[in-house]
Image: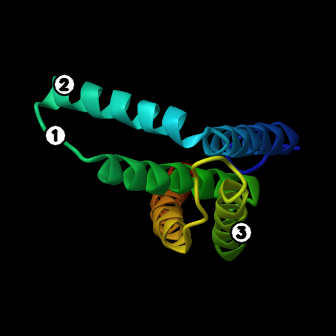
Amino acid sequence: MKNKYGVSQKIYIAISWTLTVALMVTIFCLSSQVSSKSSGLSSGVISRITELFHITLTQHTVRKTAHALEYAALCFLFSCSWQSVFLKSFLSAALYASSDELHQYFVSGRACQPRDVLVDCLGASFGLLAFFIIYTVYTHIHKNKAR
């Protein structure tokens, strides 16, 4: 059975959940890095940004931005996977953010930071907003083509 966008419903769901789980695994792996390896990754990103754009960022800025972006992407993917059930998508991302911070408590040199969960939730809300805008525009265009 095809959905309203012409894609097989089963294929759409399989792809959506595969991408969602892949991002969750990526976040888990990044959170599993000991502090020295994580700092090295942040330093590499800072060097690259400085080289490309001639601006200097702090590790704090890069880390918080990374938190927000990864959870924006995760909530966007949850929105695809849960088929536009927005509250469920946001709560799924928020729950994963909380579990990720708890996981970091057990990683050498890392800490469980409640404020990171807030940053993650802020990022998730932006991901949800992006999905909503894209979904609304796409649905509007699709409806106009059907006329």
Can you say whether 36 is above or below 112 in the image? above
Residue named by callout 3? 95
Q: Is residue 55 left or right of residue 124?
A: left
The answer to whether residue 134 is seen in the rendering is no
Q: CA distance from mark 1 to mark 3?
A: 33 Å
Q: Nearer the viewer, mark 1 or mark 2?
A: 1
Which of the numbered marks, if any, corresponds to residue 29? none
Q: Nearer the viewer, mark 1 or mark 3?
A: 1
Which is more toward the observer, 135 or 117?
A: 117
Residue at the spot x=25%, y=47% of the render? 58
Residue named by callout 1? 56
Disc on the earlier residue, 1 or 3: 1
Q: Are marks 1 and 3 in contact (CB under 8 Å)?
A: no
SS category of the residue bearing label 1: loop
Residue at the spot x=78%, y=45% of the render? 17
SS category of the residue bearing label 3: helix
Q: Amino acid at mark 1?
A: Thr
Instruction: Give the image location of residue 35, x and y in percent.
Output: 53, 42
Disc on the earlier residue, 2 or 3: 2
Instruction: Give the image location of residue 146, x and y in percent.
Output: 58, 51
Q: Amino acid at mark 3?
A: Leu
Q: CA distance from mark 2 to mark 3?
A: 35 Å
Residue named by callout 2? 52
Q: Amino acid at mark 2?
A: Leu
